[in-house]
Each structure stands twice: as C-alpha cells, then as structure tokens.
Amino acid sequence: MGGTALLAVEPGQALIGRCTGCRKAYRAELPGSAIVCAGYATPVARNYGYPTWHDCRAGIPCPLDKDALLPACGFTGCDGHDRTPITYKPLKVTYKPGAACGPGNCGGAVTATCVCSCNGKNHGSAWLVSGGLRPLR
C-alpha cells in the first residue's frame, strides 16, 4: 500500500537545510503543531518564514561540464546566478542517553540525522536562522 509518509514535527524538533551551491547548513525550528510530509520540508520551511534561497553564487560563473562545451548550468553566457536553492529535510532523531552531546557532533552537525542524548534539541543549533513561528499567508 503506497502513500506519502507524514512526519509530525514535535516541539523542539527542526528541519535541517543545505544550500545546493555552497553546502552551507541551516536549521529551521517549527512549532509542535506543524506536519511535514516527506519531500515537502522546503515548502514548509518557506511557509514558516525561513530562507529557501542563498546568494552564494552571485557573479561566479558555473564550471564547464565534463565535455568542456557548456557551463554546468547549461547557459552559454553564464556569469553567475543570483540565487541558489536551499533544501530542507526533517530531523530524524534517535535518542541515545549515553551519547555525548557537543558542538562537534551535534551543535555543528550538518546532516538531518541525530543520534544523541539531547534528543535533537541541539542538533545543528549553530546554523539556526531566523524565521516565523506561524505560517505566512
């Protein structure tokens, strides 16, 4: 039986985002009532006021493709892009009481998987960005 999995984001849980250009990490905290469908975390982050675009490639031309014929983006006159998308994923938490929580393995984490004693509370906290706590309408 197929279908889309629903992941209820509990209070204190988050979405972890990455810029597709420079791989910079982002953390978006959602209210406990938010429901994120698998594959729709980025639109949910945008709906709650978190950034979904990054300007890391502004004015920087794309590298040539493997045949050295065109820039990787496919635009022959590429002179950089104004915005690069940020994609978010729901944080998947595995509570492990004996695991040490620290800036190297949790606060500075850039993946969407947390195996720690903080239960996801500190995961990616170094990358927290401002956003709203209610949907934009």
Image (cartoon, helix red, strand yellow):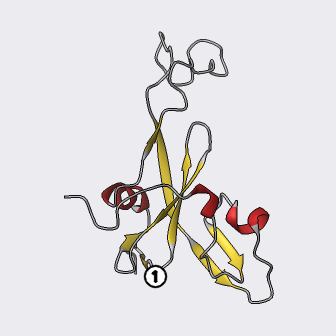
Q: Secondary structure at mark 1?
A: loop
Q: How many marks?
A: 1
Above or below, 82 against 8 in this view is above
Residue 110: which quarter of the image?
bottom right
Q: Nearer the viewer, residue 118 or 18?
A: 118
Residue at the left extreme of this rendering: 137
Q: Position of residue 55 (x, y in %)?
A: 49, 32
The residue at 57%/19% (across/down) is 60
Looking at the figure, which quarter contains the C terminus?
bottom left
Q: Amino acid at mark 1?
A: Glu
Q: What residue sits right under mark 1 in the picture?
A: 10
Q: Callout 1: few (<14), some (14-19), or many (20+) C-alpha neighbours within 10 Å?
A: few
Q: Nearer the viewer, residue 76 or 91?
A: 91
The residue at 31%/58% (across/down) is 47
Left or right placement of residue 74 versus residue 35 in this view: right
Q: Position of residue 10 (x, y in %)?
A: 46, 82
Q: Nearer the viewer, residue 132 or 1?
A: 132
Above or below, 55 against 134 in this view is above
The residue at 49%/21% (across/down) is 74
Residue 53: which quarter of the image?
top left
Q: Position of residue 6 (x, y in %)?
A: 40, 77
Looking at the figure, which quarter contains the N terminus?
bottom left
Above or below, 110 against 51 in this view is below
Left or right placement of residue 90 versus residue 103 in this view: left
Q: Position of residue 34 (x, y in %)?
A: 35, 75
